[in-house]
Image: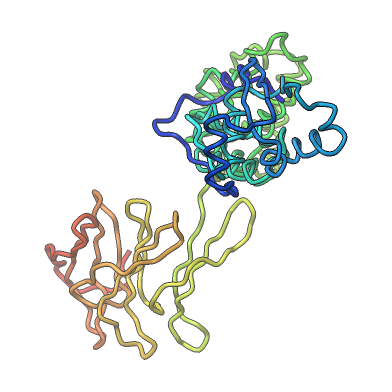
């Protein structure tokens, strides 16, 4: 188990509120009261710093597989009356584990302590607490916690937490690469990130800078072959010409024969048809509504992931839609549902999708029902422009939606009616 001091340095600054962990089975209130008061205890458990905790063998063996094996049968007779020393378990971790065993829950002060508790729970083999701590880590992933949580997940074999941490590290890559923690990130983690299509970066220049900064911080310096192997993960053809001329050509790591050859090869391959895909980050394509082969409105909603190359079904809309439009405002997607199965507009319905919860909700209707209008977002407001009505007359009116007021208002109309405009 990693020492508590190293864990604290590797993790994030304290969070503002305690992190609650639940999901365990509580002992009877009388047993909890005896534990709190230290009454009728028969086991003394000592943490790494020498802090002693008094507990009941029957309770801790039922909550911890480690204690069960340690105190079962003849071993209990051999250890009776002697303190159980746990030099691998810090005081905060042991306190939280005992609290969880007795009450079915515990609270930790911050993300740093959360790592300590998860590792203590894993050492003492308390699966419900490990699961609760892992879920809490996933919920507290950020630029300051992603690398530390990723390392813990790998050590403990927590695949879901590891996947969540990798995604968070890719999402916050530029912030992470600007921190001192980036300089001490393990090489395998650096390679995994630089190779990822998921990196959310403004440009490939950020990836190059992160790679070079990390390489210069290593002591002793990596061998030339290892350094160039890492730099090959940078997609050089995506760098701007100015950046290459002013920065890349002046980098000592690349001013060697092997470095120049690597640069030449990367550009040569791109010029001769080897495509270099840009980092897609977390961009996804959403497909809203439409018409079926039978000419019916389709309420289904799907999302395409450019990295995996797969479509996934999401929550369906409340109303079948074709002939409508969609737009993104404030991180949410709006669908203006304007057509019914008989090609008659419904009463100007509008639905809003929240990707965080995968749910739709109906918001204020437009004042005018429109088929094949145009939609645009300007300065935090959603505009609906033109379209046609059920009589195939082109509409010139324009209206604007305010998400804070959940209301539409008319604005100046166009000089002529238009539909299917861009």
Task: Identify the image quadrant of the N terminus.
Answer: top right
The structure residue drawn at horizontal position 65% and vertical position 15%, both measured from the top left corner, is 50
Point out the residue furthest to the right here.
74
Residue 223's place in the image compared with 375, above or below, is above
Residue 123's place in the image compared with 158, above or below, is above
Please state the horizontal and vertical placement of residue 119, each as a whole percent of the image.
66, 31
The structure residue drawn at horizontal position 67% and vertical position 13%, both measured from the top left corner, is 218
Please state the horizontal and vertical placement of residue 309, each as a whole percent of the image.
63, 57
Count of labels in the image: 0
The structure residue drawn at horizontal position 62% and vertical position 40%, both measured from the top left corner, is 101
Nearer the observer, 157 or 242: 157
Nearer the observer, 234 or 214: 214
Point out the residue furthest to the top here.
220
Q: Is 118 on the left-hand or right-hand side of 326?
A: right
Residue 154 shows up from this direction: no
Please state the horizontal and vertical placement of residue 363, each as a whole percent of the image.
27, 67
Task: Identify the image quadrant of the C terminus.
Answer: bottom left
Residue 192 shows up from this direction: yes
Q: Is 218 on the left-hand or right-hand side of 99?
A: right
Nearer the observer, 199 or 415: 199
Colour convention: rainbow
Please state the horizontal and vertical placement of residue 160, each as a whole percent of the image.
65, 46
Nearer the observer, 291 or 391: 291
The structure residue drawn at horizontal position 38% and vertical position 78%, both measured from the top left corner, is 319
């Amino acid at each position: 188990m990693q020492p508590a001091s190293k864990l604290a340095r590797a993790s994030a600054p304290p969070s503002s509120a305690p992190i609650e962990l639940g999901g365990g089975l509580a002992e009877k209130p009388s047993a909890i009261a005896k534990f709190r008061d230290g009454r009728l205890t028969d086991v003394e458990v000592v943490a790494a710093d020498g802090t002693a905790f008094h507990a009941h063998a029957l309770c801790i063996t039922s909550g911890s597989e480690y204690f069960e094996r340690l105190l079962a049968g003849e071993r209990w007779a051999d250890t009776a009356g002697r303190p159980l020393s746990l030099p691998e378990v810090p005081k905060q971790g042991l306190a939280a584990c005992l609290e969880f065993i007795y009450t079915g829950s515990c609270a930790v002060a911050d993300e740093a302590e959360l790592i300590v508790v998860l590792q203590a729970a894993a050492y003492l083999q308390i699966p419900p607490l490990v699961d609760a701590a892992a879920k809490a880590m996933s919920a507290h992933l950020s630029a300051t916690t992603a690398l530390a949580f990723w390392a813990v997940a790998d050590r403990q074999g927590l695949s879901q937490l590891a996947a969540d941490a990798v995604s968070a590290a890719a999402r916050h890559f530029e912030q992470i690469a600007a921190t001192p923690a980036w300089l001490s990130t393990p090489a395998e983690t650096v390679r995994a990130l630089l190779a990822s299509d998921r990196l959310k970066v403004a440009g490939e220049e950020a990836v190059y800078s992160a790679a070079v900064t990390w390489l210069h911080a290593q002591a002793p310096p990596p061998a030339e072959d290892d350094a160039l192997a890492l730099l090959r993960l940078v997609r050089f053809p995506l760098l701007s010409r100015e950046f290459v001329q002013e920065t890349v050509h002046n980098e000592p790591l690349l001013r060697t024969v092997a470095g120049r050859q690597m640069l030449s090869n990367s550009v040569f391959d791109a010029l001769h048809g080897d495509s270099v895909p840009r980092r897609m980050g977390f961009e996804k394509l959403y497909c809203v509504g439409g018409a079926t082969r039978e000419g019916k409105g389709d309420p289904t909603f799907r999302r395409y992931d450019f990295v995996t190359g797969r479509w996934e079904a999401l929550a369906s809309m409340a109303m079948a839609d074709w002939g409508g439009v969609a737009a993104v405002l404030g991180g949410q997607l709006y669908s203006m549902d304007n057509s019914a199965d008989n090609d008659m507009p419904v009463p100007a319905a509008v639905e809003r999708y929240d990707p965080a919860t995968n749910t739709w909700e109906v918001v204020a209707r437009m004042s005018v029902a429109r088929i094949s209008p145009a939609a645009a977002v300007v300065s935090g407001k959603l505009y609906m422009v033109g379209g046609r009505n059920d009589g195939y007359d082109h509409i010139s009116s324009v209206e604007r939606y305010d998400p804070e007021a959940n209301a539409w208002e008319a604005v100046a109309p166009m000089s002529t009616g238009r539909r299917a405009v861009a």
